[in-house]
Image: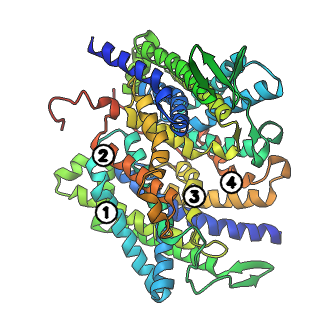
């Protein structure tokens, strides 16, 4: 019962948020919700199935460029290119899955890190698709009568929703879908199989879990959500260079999942709110500009604070934000 | 042929530096099971410490290197004592994320303190070079290879013949058993982190040598050394050295010979492609051992 009340309150807050925030805060909020879709995917992979991936940025990029190719170059409707972005990224995820069967733990982390570097190399050189180092434009979402281009305003009765708000609500709807999937999959056969593989791979395989299939499924699901998130992210940015899909982006997703609480349902959104909104918030702190005059750049200071916050948080609260209300009764050894 | 020898020399020189970087990763991984993503930041810190002591403070260069090595060893031990000691036993992933956080903070801390521009290293070698059979040999690279060889020799002797080295090996093999025979395991851990810091100073120093310079992007070299540690097997110091040299040579040779059709800067990803190919055949690296798993 209590869970339901909290859930209802959270949904209500998320729904009315755009009317309470200024434009810049709403932009940050939209990025957070878009990122949370991708973080939900990574949470299935890392939190449920226990597979470490630093390659999330690569799958976001695949989704983004699929969206650009289909939406802008071929003129498809967003109702098609958003799912297609997920599917193409998912196919790439399914290809990485078998590699995870051979490698474990940190070896897998470094191979997926290689995926980011090799991907960036390809994106920098595939000029016809990505625009090369100069970058390219990405299409705005247009679904039937709904046009998300900048400057367009949707009127519903007396309410006005501008393009920021539209992106926010679309991202929120997709996040709801992703979260519902993550919530439900835990209670299915494949969800339990994932947890079994995370806890003890050999025991799981002895019990009859098809480890290969579980890992491929987890990578596919994670990459699908990353692809959708990436397509939406690039569309909202409207312009991106290949450098956007860097290791730092992957690290931010990993940080979001861990800070939010691995394997929890609310974790990805909470973690994304911290990780993706924090740099913006830190840059806008009132006392920072004075120090900037002393020769130290604001972005350096915010990055220092960002790094230290991750460290302090993980040392003090290893179970993540979602673990805060349910502290274990007795301290564990 | 001359071109090949020239590239080979540069490759071995770069590889020697990667070997130092990779050894820093390997000693920490072997003792604590963590890939220290802050190692890149420590390289950066090491190079800037040398530069600051030699140029701003005005110490003799050899003295500056020595002092910087001690400082970085202390920094490494402090990282262990202040942070990683408190989170022992947490999931690997959380530990890795913590080192990433430290790396971000330290990298930007250095940039905030010294500014975004290239600095002088203050080394006596500069761009000095001599010719040997048509091959241009930079003095700083010769020193780099020599110092690396010396440092590696010292490390392996330390590891094999001293009490502390043996204690490190024992701790890596079985921490509880080692603790039960009276080895101060926590101090051993601190010692490995200090060692990683000291190695980072030497690695950073030669990465910042001609034609490089102390600059904020220096730490990225650690990312390029990742394939080296994986190739060698994460916890294997010998593997780190072999992998490091191999990756250096692969990187420089591809930069010289890769056809333009593979795209610009192909050399930067060649080590990663080599790494993935080798890992698919040998999942625990060339020298790594498959851990025994129990149900």
What residue is disc 1 on? B78
Residue at mark 4 to residue at mark 1: CA–CA distance: 33 Å
Residue at mark 3 to residue at mark 4: CA–CA distance: 11 Å
Residue A85 is situated, as x and y percent measured from the top left of the image, at 68, 24
Residue at mark 3 to residue at mark 1: CA–CA distance: 23 Å
How many marks are shown on the rendered structure? 4
Residue A6 is situated, as x and y percent measured from the top left of the image, at 32, 19
User: In this rendering, is residue B241 above or below B137?
Assistant: above
Asked whether the residues under the numbered discs 2 and 4 touch, taking CB atoms below 8 Å apart as contact, a structural biologist would say: no
Same-subunit check for callouts 2 and 4 = no
Looking at the image, tell me whether mark 4 or mark 1 is earlier in sequence order: 1
Tell me the residue at 47%/38% (across/down): A254
Mark 4: secondary structure: helix
Q: Nearer the viewer, mark 2 or mark 1?
A: 2
| Residue B220, label in figure | 3
Tell me the residue at 30%/60% (across/down): B190
What residue is disc 4 on? B268
């Amino acid at each position: 019962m209590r869970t339901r009340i909290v859930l209802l309150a959270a949904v209500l807050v998320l729904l009315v948020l755009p009317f309470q925030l200024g434009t810049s805060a709403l932009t940050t909020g939209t990025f957070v919700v878009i990122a949370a879709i991708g973080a939900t995917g990574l949470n299935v992979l890392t939190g449920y199935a226990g597979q470490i991936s630093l390659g999330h940025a690569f799958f976001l990029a695949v989704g983004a460029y699929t969206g650009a190719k289909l939406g802008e170059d071929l003129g498809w409707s967003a109702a098609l290119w958003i799912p297609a972005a997920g599917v193409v990224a998912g196919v790439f995820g399914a290809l990485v899955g078998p590699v995870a069967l051979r490698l474990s733990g940190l070896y897998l982390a470094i191979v997926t890190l290689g995926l980011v570097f090799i991907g960036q190399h390809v994106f920098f050189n595939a000029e016809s698709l990505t625009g090369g180092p100069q970058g390219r434009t990405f299409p705005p979402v247009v679904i039937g009568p709904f046009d998300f281009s900048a400057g367009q305003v949707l009127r519903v009765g007396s309410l006005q929703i501008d393009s920021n708000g539209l992106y926010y609500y679309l991202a929120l709807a997709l996040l709801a879908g992703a979260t519902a999937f993550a919530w439900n999959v835990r209670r299915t056969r494949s969800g339990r199989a994932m947890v079994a593989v995370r806890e003890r791979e050999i025991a799981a395989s002895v019990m009859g879990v098809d480890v290969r299939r579980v890992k491929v499924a987890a990578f596919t699901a994670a990459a699908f959500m990353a692809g959708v998130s990436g397509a939406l992210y690039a569309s909202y940015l409207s312009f991106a260079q290949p450098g956007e899909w860097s290791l730092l982006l992957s690290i931010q997703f990993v940080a979001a999942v861990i800070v939010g609480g691995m394997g929890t349902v609310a974790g990805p959104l909470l973690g994304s709110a911290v990780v993706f909104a924090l740099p913006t918030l830190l840059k806008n702190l009132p006392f920072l500009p004075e120090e900037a005059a002393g020769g130290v750049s604001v972005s350096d200071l915010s990055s220092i604070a960002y790094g230290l916050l991750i460290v302090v948080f993980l040392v003090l609260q290893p179970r993540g934000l979602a673990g805060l209300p349910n502290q274990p009764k007795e301290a564990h050894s | 042929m001359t071109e090949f020898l020239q590239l080979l020399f540069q490759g071995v020189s770069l590889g020697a530096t990667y070997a130092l970087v990779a050894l820093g990763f390997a000693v920490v991984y072997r003792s604590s099971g963590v890939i220290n993503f802050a190692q890149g930041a420590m390289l950066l810190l090491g190079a800037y410490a040398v530069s600051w002591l030699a140029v701003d403070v005005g110490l003799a260069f050899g003295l500056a290197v020595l002092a910087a090595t001690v400082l970085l060893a202390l920094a490494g031990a402090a990282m262990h004592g202040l942070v990683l000691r408190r989170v022992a036993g947490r999931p690997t992933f959380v530990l890795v994320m913590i080192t990433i956080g430290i790396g971000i903070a330290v990298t930007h801390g250095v940039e905030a303190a010294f500014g975004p521009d290239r600095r002088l290293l203050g080394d006596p070698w500069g761009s000095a070079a001599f010719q040997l059979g048509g091959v241009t040999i930079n003095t700083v690279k010769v020193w780099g290879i020599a110092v690396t060889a010396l440092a590696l020799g010292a490390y392996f002797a330390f590891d094999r013949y001293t009490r502390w080295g043996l204690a490190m090996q024992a701790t890596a093999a079985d921490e509880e058993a080692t603790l039960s025979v009276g080895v101060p395991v926590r101090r051993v851990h601190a010692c490995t982190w200090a060692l990683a810091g000291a190695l980072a100073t030497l690695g950073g120093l030669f990465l910042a040598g001609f034609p490089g310079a102390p600059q904020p992007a220096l730490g990225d070299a650690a990312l390029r050394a990742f394939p080296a540690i994986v190739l060698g097997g994460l916890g294997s110091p010998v593997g780190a050295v072999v992998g490091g040299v191999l990756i250096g040579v692969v990187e420089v040779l591809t930069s010289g010979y890769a056809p333009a059709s593979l795209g610009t800067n192909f050399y930067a990803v060649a080590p990663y492609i080599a790494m993935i190919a080798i890992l698919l055949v040998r999942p625990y690296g060339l020298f790594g051992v498959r851990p025994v798993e129990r149900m």
